[in-house]
């Protein structure tokens, strides 16, 4: 790859950068992710509680 192009190519498979999303969209995405993390943590907690019995 020529030196002047090094680091300038973009992976077409990556998701859109958060920096380019409107703030309203960012808030919704963050809250959705937070809810999913909370669901996973509740599942892990339930598994751990079952194992301790």
Image (cartoon, helix red, strand yellow):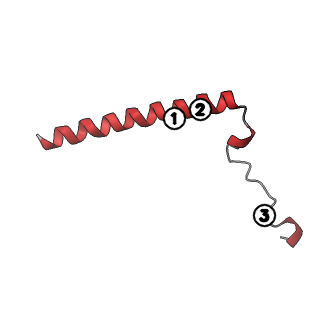
Label 3, secondary structure: give it.
loop
Q: Is residue 9 above or below residue 52?
A: below
Q: Is residue 30 left or right of residue 42?
A: right
User: The C terminus appears in which quarter of the rendering?
Assistant: top left
Quadrant of res 8 = bottom right
Label 2, secondary structure: give it.
helix
Q: Is residue 50 left or right of residue 12?
A: left
Q: Is residue 16 visible?
A: no
Q: Residue at (25%, 35%) from the top-left corner?
A: 46
Dots 1, 2 in contact, CB < 8 A = yes
Q: Which mark is residue 7?
A: 3
Residue identifier under label 1: 33
Q: Is residue 19 above or below residue 2?
A: above
Q: Residue at (81%, 67%) from the top-left corner?
A: 6
Q: Which mark is residue 52?
A: none
Using the numbered discs, state the Cα–Cα distance from disc 1 to disc 2 in whole angstroms: 6 Å
Q: Is residue 10 above or below residue 4?
A: above
Q: Position of residue 23 (x, y in %)?
A: 69, 31
User: The N terminus appears in which quarter of the rendering?
Assistant: bottom right
Q: Position of residue 25 (x, y in %)?
A: 66, 29
Q: Residue at (24%, 39%) from the top-left corner?
A: 47
Q: Position of residue 22 (x, y in %)?
A: 73, 31
Dots 1, 3 in contact, CB < 8 A = no
Q: Is residue 51 visible?
A: yes
Quadrant of res 52 = top left
Residue identifier under label 2: 29
Quadrant of res 5 = bottom right
Q: Residue at (86%, 72%) from the top-left corner?
A: 3
Label 3 environment density (alpha carbons within 10 Å; few <14, some 14–19, many ≥20): few
């Amino acid at each position: 790859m020529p030196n002047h192009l090094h680091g300038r190519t973009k992976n077409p498979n990556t998701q859109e950068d958060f920096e380019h999303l409107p703030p309203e969209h960012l808030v919704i995405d963050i809250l959705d992710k937070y809810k999913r993390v909370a669901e996973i943590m509740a599942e892990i907690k339930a598994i751990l509680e079952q194992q301790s019995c």
